[in-house]
Image: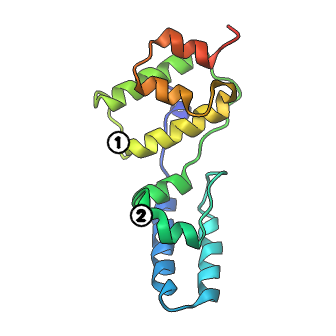
Amino acid sequence: MKESLKPHRDIYAEAQLKEIIGEIQALLHESKGDAVDELLKKAAQFIKSPDRVLDLEVIEHYEGWTDLDGLAGELTMEVPRLENISKEDFTEIVLWIRKAVENEQEMGDIRPDFLMDFYREFFALHFPDAGDGELLDEIFDGAPLEKLLGIAFPDS
């Protein structure tokens, strides 16, 4: 499968962001608003995901839905905007995801939650008419490839 179709992580950006979040968390207990604002600005340079923000509410409550590694991964995730996804590319993605979920595909440093977040964003970007999350849900539910192709490419 093409590298542009696979999720990838920016380990450096994640590490930097985790360090900044730790500094902010330490300062929250000391009421140093100006320093926190500066750190939030510094953190913004590492946030790649267009629909995600890092603010005090996120920092105070992220542990309710993920851990620090998951938060940093979500915020630094870059989903490529590709001009065209062919049916063959789509089929390779589906097979790759299914093998990864079944532990038949080496994912390296990609966590399962990162994989899901990446492809949820990827499908929303490249197949906007397929329904919010419907493609990914159908992939994980084991839908036949023909059904998935019909959702992704309804005019074919």
The image shows a total of numbered marks equal to 2
Report the amino acid beneath label 1.
Answer: Gly
- CA–CA distance in space, label 1 to label 2: 24 Å
Q: Which residue is mark 2?
A: 63
For the point 65% across and 51% down, the residue is 51
Q: How is the image coloured?
A: rainbow
Above or below: residue 106 compared with residue 34: above
Mark 2 neighbour class, 10 Å CA radius: few under 14, some 14 to 19, many 20 or more: few
Which of discs 1 and 2 lies nearer the camera? The answer is: 2
Above or below: residue 109 compared with residue 57: above
Looking at the figure, which quarter contains the C terminus? top right
Looking at the picture, how far across and down is residue 64, in whole percent? 42, 61
Above or below: residue 104 compared with residue 74: above
Q: Which residue is mark 1?
A: 108
Looking at the picture, how far across and down is residue 41, in whole percent? 65, 73
Mark 2 lies on a secondary structure that is helix
Report the amino acid beneath label 2.
Answer: Glu
Whether residue 16 is visible, yes or no, is no
Whether residue 115 is visible, yes or no, is yes
**128 relative to 21 in the view: left or right:** right
Mark 1 neighbour class, 10 Å CA radius: few under 14, some 14 to 19, many 20 or more: few
**86 relative to 101 in the view: left or right:** right
